[in-house]
Amino acid sequence: MREAAQKADNQGSLFADGEHSGFRLKRLEIFNWGIYDKNIWCLAAGGRNTLLVGDIGSGKSTLADAIVTLLVPPRKIIYNRAAGGEFRERTLLSYVRGEYKSQKNALDNRGKPVCLREAGTYSVILVSFFNEGYGQHVTLAQVFWLVGDDIRRFYVVAQSDLTIKGQFTDFDGEMAKLKKRISSLPDMFVTDHFSEYSSKFRNLFGLPSEKALELFFQTVSMKQVASLNDFVREHMIVPSDSADKIDDLRKHYENLTRAHELVQKAKAQLQLLQPIVANCVNYEKAVCEVADIEVCRQVL
Protein backbone atom coordinates (compact mmCIF):
# COMPACT_ATOMS: atom_id res chain seq x y z
CA MET A 1 0.00 0.00 0.00
CA ARG A 2 2.87 2.39 0.75
CA GLU A 3 4.39 1.85 -2.71
CA ALA A 4 1.02 2.55 -4.30
CA ALA A 5 0.67 5.74 -2.26
CA GLN A 6 4.15 6.92 -3.34
CA LYS A 7 3.34 6.15 -6.95
CA ALA A 8 0.08 8.09 -6.78
CA ASP A 9 1.80 11.08 -5.18
CA ASN A 10 4.49 11.12 -7.86
CA GLN A 11 1.91 11.29 -10.62
CA GLY A 12 1.11 14.93 -9.84
CA SER A 13 -2.23 15.23 -11.61
CA LEU A 14 -4.00 11.92 -11.17
CA PHE A 15 -5.77 12.06 -14.51
CA ALA A 16 -4.95 13.76 -17.77
CA ASP A 17 -8.11 12.92 -19.72
CA GLY A 18 -10.47 15.24 -17.77
CA GLU A 19 -13.10 12.52 -17.44
CA HIS A 20 -12.89 12.10 -13.68
CA SER A 21 -14.60 15.25 -12.46
CA GLY A 22 -16.07 15.41 -8.99
CA PHE A 23 -14.41 14.58 -5.70
CA ARG A 24 -12.92 11.08 -5.65
CA LEU A 25 -11.01 9.24 -2.95
CA LYS A 26 -7.33 9.79 -3.51
CA ARG A 27 -5.85 8.33 -0.33
CA LEU A 28 -6.82 6.87 3.04
CA GLU A 29 -4.33 7.07 5.91
CA ILE A 30 -4.67 5.62 9.41
CA PHE A 31 -2.48 5.71 12.48
CA ASN A 32 -3.17 3.59 15.58
CA TRP A 33 -6.57 2.49 14.32
CA GLY A 34 -7.73 -1.03 15.14
CA ILE A 35 -5.08 -3.64 14.38
CA TYR A 36 -3.07 -1.10 12.37
CA ASP A 37 -0.62 -0.15 15.10
CA LYS A 38 2.24 2.35 15.49
CA ASN A 39 3.03 2.94 11.81
CA ILE A 40 1.15 5.15 9.34
CA TRP A 41 -0.77 2.90 6.99
CA CYS A 42 -1.94 4.16 3.61
CA LEU A 43 -4.40 2.93 0.99
CA ALA A 44 -3.90 4.85 -2.26
CA ALA A 45 -7.06 4.68 -4.37
CA GLY A 46 -5.85 7.36 -6.77
CA GLY A 47 -9.41 8.42 -7.58
CA ARG A 48 -10.15 5.10 -9.26
CA ASN A 49 -12.28 2.12 -8.35
CA THR A 50 -10.38 0.08 -5.80
CA LEU A 51 -10.83 -3.59 -4.92
CA LEU A 52 -9.73 -4.48 -1.39
CA VAL A 53 -9.28 -8.21 -0.78
CA GLY A 54 -7.80 -10.27 2.04
CA ASP A 55 -8.35 -13.11 4.47
CA ILE A 56 -10.90 -12.93 7.27
CA GLY A 57 -9.52 -10.76 10.05
CA SER A 58 -6.92 -9.11 7.84
CA GLY A 59 -8.41 -5.63 8.41
CA LYS A 60 -10.65 -4.93 5.39
CA SER A 61 -13.63 -3.90 7.50
CA THR A 62 -11.34 -1.85 9.73
CA LEU A 63 -10.41 0.32 6.76
CA ALA A 64 -14.04 0.59 5.67
CA ASP A 65 -15.04 1.60 9.20
CA ALA A 66 -12.37 4.32 9.17
CA ILE A 67 -14.02 5.91 6.12
CA VAL A 68 -17.46 5.48 7.70
CA THR A 69 -16.24 7.21 10.86
CA LEU A 70 -15.06 10.18 8.83
CA LEU A 71 -18.36 10.64 6.96
CA VAL A 72 -21.25 9.32 9.06
CA PRO A 73 -22.63 10.88 12.29
CA PRO A 74 -21.29 8.94 15.31
CA ARG A 75 -24.77 8.17 16.68
CA LYS A 76 -25.69 6.30 13.49
CA ILE A 77 -22.59 4.14 13.08
CA ILE A 78 -22.67 0.39 13.59
CA TYR A 79 -19.13 -0.85 13.12
CA ASN A 80 -18.10 -3.95 11.19
CA ARG A 81 -21.33 -4.01 9.17
CA ALA A 82 -19.28 -4.53 6.03
CA ALA A 83 -18.47 -7.99 7.44
CA GLY A 84 -22.00 -8.59 8.69
CA GLY A 85 -21.26 -7.57 12.28
CA GLU A 86 -24.01 -6.77 14.74
CA PHE A 87 -24.45 -3.76 16.99
CA ARG A 88 -21.66 -3.24 19.56
CA GLU A 89 -19.51 -6.04 18.13
CA ARG A 90 -16.94 -3.30 17.59
CA THR A 91 -16.92 0.21 18.98
CA LEU A 92 -14.94 3.37 18.56
CA LEU A 93 -13.22 2.59 21.84
CA SER A 94 -12.16 -0.85 20.60
CA TYR A 95 -10.69 0.70 17.45
CA VAL A 96 -8.81 3.42 19.34
CA ARG A 97 -7.46 0.96 21.92
CA GLY A 98 -6.62 -1.62 19.26
CA GLU A 99 -8.55 -4.57 20.68
CA TYR A 100 -7.56 -7.63 18.69
CA LYS A 101 -8.62 -10.62 20.79
CA SER A 102 -10.40 -11.65 23.98
CA GLN A 103 -8.63 -13.41 26.84
CA LYS A 104 -10.54 -15.30 29.53
CA ASN A 105 -9.96 -14.58 33.17
CA ALA A 106 -9.14 -17.74 35.12
CA LEU A 107 -11.08 -16.52 38.18
CA ASP A 108 -14.49 -15.74 36.71
CA ASN A 109 -14.03 -17.23 33.22
CA ARG A 110 -15.04 -13.94 31.65
CA GLY A 111 -13.49 -12.64 28.50
CA LYS A 112 -11.36 -9.51 28.67
CA PRO A 113 -10.21 -7.68 25.55
CA VAL A 114 -6.50 -7.55 24.87
CA CYS A 115 -5.42 -4.17 23.49
CA LEU A 116 -2.48 -2.97 21.48
CA ARG A 117 -2.63 0.51 23.00
CA GLU A 118 -3.33 2.11 26.35
CA ALA A 119 -3.81 5.68 27.54
CA GLY A 120 -1.13 8.10 26.42
CA THR A 121 -1.37 7.25 22.73
CA TYR A 122 -3.44 8.90 20.05
CA SER A 123 -5.06 7.82 16.78
CA VAL A 124 -5.63 9.57 13.48
CA ILE A 125 -7.77 8.66 10.46
CA LEU A 126 -7.52 10.79 7.33
CA VAL A 127 -8.93 10.75 3.81
CA SER A 128 -7.84 12.93 0.94
CA PHE A 129 -10.27 13.67 -1.91
CA PHE A 130 -9.31 15.22 -5.23
CA ASN A 131 -11.45 16.85 -7.92
CA GLU A 132 -9.45 16.48 -11.10
CA GLY A 133 -11.84 18.65 -13.10
CA TYR A 134 -11.19 21.72 -10.94
CA GLY A 135 -7.86 20.79 -9.35
CA GLN A 136 -9.39 20.94 -5.85
CA HIS A 137 -8.32 19.02 -2.75
CA VAL A 138 -10.39 18.32 0.36
CA THR A 139 -8.94 16.45 3.33
CA LEU A 140 -10.99 15.13 6.24
CA ALA A 141 -9.35 13.95 9.44
CA GLN A 142 -10.28 12.99 12.97
CA VAL A 143 -7.87 12.78 15.90
CA PHE A 144 -8.66 10.58 18.93
CA TRP A 145 -7.02 10.12 22.31
CA LEU A 146 -7.94 8.39 25.56
CA VAL A 147 -8.61 9.98 28.93
CA GLY A 148 -9.22 6.93 31.09
CA ASP A 149 -11.85 4.99 29.13
CA ASP A 150 -13.28 8.16 27.60
CA ILE A 151 -12.48 9.09 24.03
CA ARG A 152 -11.70 12.69 23.17
CA ARG A 153 -11.49 13.88 19.59
CA PHE A 154 -11.47 16.83 17.24
CA TYR A 155 -12.40 17.12 13.58
CA VAL A 156 -10.43 18.68 10.73
CA VAL A 157 -11.52 19.85 7.28
CA ALA A 158 -8.88 21.27 4.95
CA GLN A 159 -9.01 22.53 1.37
CA SER A 160 -5.57 21.10 0.73
CA ASP A 161 -3.85 17.71 0.55
CA LEU A 162 -2.81 16.84 4.11
CA THR A 163 -0.93 13.79 5.38
CA ILE A 164 -0.64 12.29 8.84
CA LYS A 165 3.14 12.46 8.75
CA GLY A 166 3.18 16.06 7.58
CA GLN A 167 0.61 17.61 9.93
CA PHE A 168 -0.25 15.16 12.74
CA THR A 169 3.12 13.97 14.05
CA ASP A 170 6.24 15.40 15.67
CA PHE A 171 4.73 17.09 18.72
CA ASP A 172 5.29 16.69 22.45
CA GLY A 173 2.15 14.68 23.13
CA GLU A 174 0.02 17.65 24.22
CA MET A 175 -3.15 17.27 22.15
CA ALA A 176 -4.14 20.88 22.79
CA LYS A 177 -0.87 22.01 21.18
CA LEU A 178 -1.43 19.73 18.19
CA LYS A 179 -4.94 21.11 17.76
CA LYS A 180 -3.68 24.69 18.01
CA ARG A 181 -0.90 24.03 15.52
CA ILE A 182 -3.30 22.54 12.98
CA SER A 183 -5.80 25.37 13.50
CA SER A 184 -3.11 27.89 12.61
CA LEU A 185 -2.55 26.39 9.15
CA PRO A 186 -4.17 28.15 6.14
CA ASP A 187 -7.54 26.92 4.79
CA MET A 188 -8.03 24.79 7.91
CA PHE A 189 -11.29 24.22 9.78
CA VAL A 190 -11.03 22.57 13.21
CA THR A 191 -13.96 21.85 15.54
CA ASP A 192 -15.05 19.61 18.40
CA HIS A 193 -18.54 19.05 16.98
CA PHE A 194 -19.48 16.65 14.20
CA SER A 195 -22.43 18.78 13.07
CA GLU A 196 -20.15 21.73 12.27
CA TYR A 197 -17.58 19.42 10.68
CA SER A 198 -20.23 17.68 8.57
CA SER A 199 -21.80 20.95 7.46
CA LYS A 200 -18.39 22.21 6.37
CA PHE A 201 -17.34 19.24 4.25
CA ARG A 202 -20.85 18.75 2.80
CA ASN A 203 -20.76 22.36 1.65
CA LEU A 204 -17.39 21.74 -0.05
CA PHE A 205 -18.69 18.56 -1.70
CA GLY A 206 -21.96 20.20 -2.77
CA LEU A 207 -24.19 17.95 -0.67
CA PRO A 208 -27.24 19.91 0.56
CA SER A 209 -28.31 17.22 3.04
CA GLU A 210 -27.01 14.14 4.84
CA LYS A 211 -29.08 11.77 2.66
CA ALA A 212 -26.16 10.92 0.38
CA LEU A 213 -24.02 10.01 3.41
CA GLU A 214 -26.81 7.84 4.82
CA LEU A 215 -27.03 6.06 1.47
CA PHE A 216 -23.26 5.55 1.52
CA PHE A 217 -23.46 4.00 5.00
CA GLN A 218 -26.22 1.65 3.89
CA THR A 219 -24.35 0.52 0.78
CA VAL A 220 -21.20 -0.22 2.79
CA SER A 221 -23.00 -3.14 4.43
CA MET A 222 -25.44 -4.00 1.65
CA LYS A 223 -25.81 -7.74 1.22
CA GLN A 224 -29.24 -7.83 -0.37
CA VAL A 225 -32.24 -5.57 -0.92
CA ALA A 226 -35.53 -7.19 0.05
CA SER A 227 -37.69 -4.37 -1.27
CA LEU A 228 -36.25 -1.93 -3.78
CA ASN A 229 -39.15 0.47 -3.28
CA ASP A 230 -38.60 0.59 0.48
CA PHE A 231 -34.85 1.03 0.03
CA VAL A 232 -35.31 3.95 -2.37
CA ARG A 233 -37.98 5.53 -0.16
CA GLU A 234 -35.95 5.23 3.05
CA HIS A 235 -32.42 5.92 1.84
CA MET A 236 -32.53 7.84 -1.46
CA ILE A 237 -35.46 10.25 -1.14
CA VAL A 238 -35.03 13.29 1.07
CA PRO A 239 -37.98 13.37 3.48
CA SER A 240 -40.18 16.43 3.27
CA ASP A 241 -42.68 17.90 5.68
CA SER A 242 -45.56 17.32 3.25
CA ALA A 243 -48.06 16.83 6.07
CA ASP A 244 -47.23 20.24 7.53
CA LYS A 245 -47.41 21.83 4.10
CA ILE A 246 -50.82 20.23 3.47
CA ASP A 247 -52.03 21.53 6.84
CA ASP A 248 -50.80 25.01 5.93
CA LEU A 249 -52.54 24.81 2.56
CA ARG A 250 -55.72 23.65 4.26
CA LYS A 251 -55.56 26.56 6.71
CA HIS A 252 -54.95 29.03 3.88
CA TYR A 253 -57.84 27.54 1.93
CA GLU A 254 -60.13 27.85 4.94
CA ASN A 255 -59.04 31.47 5.40
CA LEU A 256 -59.69 32.20 1.73
CA THR A 257 -63.08 30.47 1.92
CA ARG A 258 -64.03 32.52 4.98
CA ALA A 259 -62.88 35.74 3.30
CA HIS A 260 -64.88 34.84 0.17
CA GLU A 261 -67.97 34.19 2.25
CA LEU A 262 -67.56 37.56 4.01
CA VAL A 263 -67.21 39.32 0.65
CA GLN A 264 -70.34 37.61 -0.68
CA LYS A 265 -72.22 38.54 2.50
CA ALA A 266 -71.15 42.17 2.15
CA LYS A 267 -72.28 42.19 -1.49
CA ALA A 268 -75.69 40.79 -0.47
CA GLN A 269 -76.01 43.43 2.25
CA LEU A 270 -75.18 46.17 -0.24
CA GLN A 271 -77.83 44.85 -2.61
CA LEU A 272 -80.37 44.92 0.20
CA LEU A 273 -79.47 48.53 0.96
CA GLN A 274 -79.84 49.72 -2.66
CA PRO A 275 -83.67 50.40 -2.43
CA ILE A 276 -83.16 52.38 0.79
CA VAL A 277 -80.43 54.43 -0.85
CA ALA A 278 -82.70 55.10 -3.86
CA ASN A 279 -85.59 56.15 -1.59
CA CYS A 280 -83.28 58.51 0.30
CA VAL A 281 -82.24 60.14 -2.98
CA ASN A 282 -85.89 60.52 -4.04
CA TYR A 283 -86.80 61.93 -0.63
CA GLU A 284 -84.04 64.54 -0.76
CA LYS A 285 -85.16 65.46 -4.29
CA ALA A 286 -88.78 65.83 -3.14
CA VAL A 287 -87.74 67.96 -0.15
CA CYS A 288 -85.87 70.30 -2.48
CA GLU A 289 -88.89 70.56 -4.80
CA VAL A 290 -91.19 71.30 -1.85
CA ALA A 291 -88.83 74.03 -0.66
CA ASP A 292 -88.74 75.62 -4.12
CA ILE A 293 -92.51 75.53 -4.43
CA GLU A 294 -92.89 77.07 -0.98
CA VAL A 295 -90.59 79.94 -1.95
CA CYS A 296 -92.59 80.47 -5.12
CA ARG A 297 -95.84 80.47 -3.14
CA GLN A 298 -94.54 83.04 -0.70
CA VAL A 299 -93.42 85.28 -3.56
CA LEU A 300 -96.83 84.97 -5.23
Image (cartoon, rainbow, N blue to C red):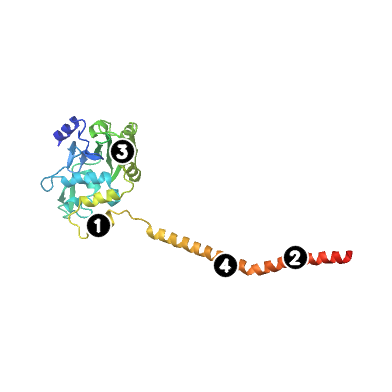
The answer to whether residue 274 is above or below residue 18 is: below
Q: Distance between the residues labelled 4 and 2?
A: 31 Å
User: Which label sits in the foreground, 3 or 4?
Assistant: 4
Which numbered dot is residue 157? 3
Evaluate if marks 4 and 1 touch, with contact meaning CB atoms under 8 Å apart.
Answer: no
Type of amino acid at the residue the image marks with label 3: Val
Which numbered dot is residue 265? 4
User: Which label sits in the foreground, 3 or 1?
Assistant: 1
Image location (x, y in percent) of residue 227? 22, 60
Type of amino acid at the residue the image marks with label 1: Phe
**Sequence-earlier tag: 3 or 4:** 3
Number of marks: 4
Quarter of the N terminus within the rendering = top left
**Sequence-earlier tag: 3 or 2:** 3
Instruction: Residue at 31%, 38% (x, y): give it.
Output: 157
Evaluate if marks 3 and 1 touch, with contact meaning CB atoms under 8 Å apart.
Answer: no
In this view, the residue farthest toward the left is 55
Instruction: Residue at 87%, 67% (x, y): give it.
Output: 297
Give SS at disc 2.
Answer: helix
Q: How far apart are marks 2 and 1 (CA)?
A: 82 Å
**Sequence-earlier tag: 4 or 2:** 4
Which numbered dot is residue 231? 1
Residue 8 occupies which quadrant of the picture? top left
**Sequence-earlier tag: 3 or 1:** 3
Q: Distance between the residues labelled 3 and 4?
A: 64 Å
User: Which label sits in the foreground, 4 or 1?
Assistant: 4
Give SS at disc 1.
Answer: helix
Q: Which residue is the site of mark 2?
A: 285
**Sequence-earlier tag: 4 or 1:** 1
